[in-house]
Amino acid sequence: MSLPSDMSFKKILLSLSIFILLAFAVVVILNRDKIVYTGKVEFIDVDCSKKASILERVYLNDQRIRKQDVPFREFAKVDHENQELVVSILEKCSMPALGEVGQKQMDAIWLILQHTEKDTRKKYFPGYLNLLFSPI
């Protein structure tokens, strides 16, 4: 068996590359409702005196959307909105203590941070865990 010439090897490589690109395009087109980029999590203005009620709403929205049969795009939109609210609270108001908010609100922070980018989790999880394991 002889090795293909340099030119035929390049043609094979080009054909394979085109096939892979077309296959990827077909997958993207067939799954376009599942592939969603909602953008960077931006800080939004939050009222620190209302953080308990905001986190309550975040928790309810997070759990509601997970129980519904909705397109992934809607799911991602709610996750993104919740991420902006939680990160904004943590930035502006700092990590709340369990005495300031209830367990459900603390669960909201945990649930939402799990769905954030790696850098966001690295930034906020240590504060959450320190609070969780500190003596009351």
Image (cartoon, helix red, strand yellow):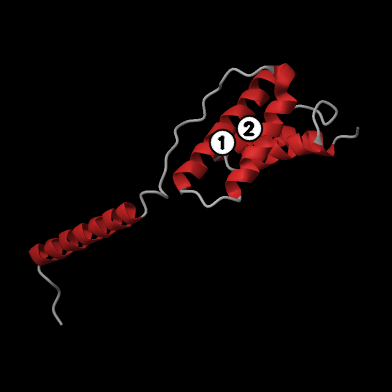
Depth order, front residue of 5/116: 116
Depth order, front residue of 131/9: 131
- Residue 131, given in percent of the width and then of the height, sits at 80, 33
- Residue 130, given in percent of the width and then of the height, sits at 78, 35
| Quadrant in which the C terminus appears | top right
- Residue 35, given in percent of the width and then of the height, sits at 40, 47
- Residue 135, given in percent of the width and then of the height, sits at 90, 34
**Mark 1 and 2 residues: CB-CB less than 8 Å, in contact?**
yes
- SS for tag 1? helix
Circle 2 residues within 10 Å: few <14, some 14–19, many ≥20: few
Residue under the image location 86 percent in, 35 percent down: 134
In the image: residue 77, left or right of residue 18: right
Q: CA distance from mark 1 to mark 2?
A: 6 Å
In the image: residue 78, left or right of residue 73: right
Could you say which disc has been placed on residue 98 in the image?
Answer: none
Residue hosting label 2:
123
Residue under the image location 42 percent in, 39 percent down: 37
Residue 136 seen in the figure = yes
- SS for tag 2? helix
- Residue 20: name its quadrant: bottom left
Residue hosting label 1:
119
| Quadrant in which the N terminus appears | bottom left
Residue under the image location 62 percent in, 44 percent down: 64
Q: Amino acid at mark 2?
A: Lys
